Amino acid sequence: MYEDITMVREILNGKYDYFDKLIYKYEKIVYIFIYALVGEESCSKEICKRVFIKVYNNLYKYNINYKLLNWVLNIAVEEYKLYIRENKNIEVKNNYLNLLNMEDKCILLLKKLKVQLSFNDIGEILNISELSARRKYRFIIQNYKKESDMVRQH
């Protein structure tokens, strides 16, 4: 976390090469998350580009009391929602993930990212409580298991 705060301070002090380091550190995580939501490469790249433009333009608003990754992923969630609203004709694959509402999709995918996000982190990213994130995740998993059992029985 200290490394992130230093990076942010350097960027805000005009050392823009540190922004390249920030992108390098978080681009893959953001892309994997967005791609899991969208399922299409060009859309995912476009949303990622929007995310890092917004991160750059709003870096002065970053609160150092929060993890930088959480703040970046919060922006990713908001940019995903905006992109979906702007592009209502996006074709989505028919699978369990697409049966979920937007917030539930995000909870499930954030928990499954390889960066070991806690429910507190997920709550921060989605602007919900830790308890709400935990409960929704359990509900999603339980429903998925029920769906899977029903499919196997038929």
Image (cartoon, grey):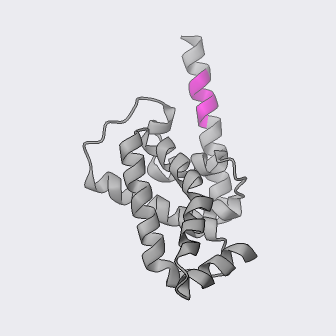
Whether residue 88 sits left or right of residue 57 in the image: it is left
Q: Nearer the viewer, residue 130 or 83?
A: 83
Majority secondary structure in the magenta region: helix
Q: Residue at x 57, y 20 (%)?
A: 150
Question: Where is residue 45 drawn, in percent x and y?
Answer: 41, 50
Question: Where is residue 97 drawn, in percent x and y?
Answer: 50, 37
Can residue 28 be seen by looking at this rendering? Answer: yes
Q: Nearer the viewer, residue 13 or 124?
A: 13
Which quadrant, please, contains the N terminus? bottom right
Number of numbered discs overlaid on the protein picture: 0
Q: Is residue 145 magenta?
A: yes
Whether residue 88 sits left or right of residue 102 in the image: it is left
Q: Residue furthest top?
A: 154
Q: Residue at x 55, y 18 (%)?
A: 151
Can residue 124 be seen by looking at this rendering? Answer: no
Q: Residue at x 59, y 46 (%)?
A: 108
Q: Residue at x 74, y 77 (%)?
A: 2
Q: Is residue 79 above or below residue 113?
A: below
Question: Where is residue 17 drawn, in percent x and y?
Answer: 55, 73
Q: Nearer the viewer, residue 145 or 125?
A: 125
Q: Quadrant of residue 152?
A: top right
Q: Is residue 132 above or below residue 32?
A: below
The magenta segment is: 143-148
Question: Where is residue 19 drawn, in percent x and y?
Answer: 54, 72
Q: Nearer the viewer, residue 59 or 150?
A: 59
Q: Is residue 95 above or below residue 138?
A: above
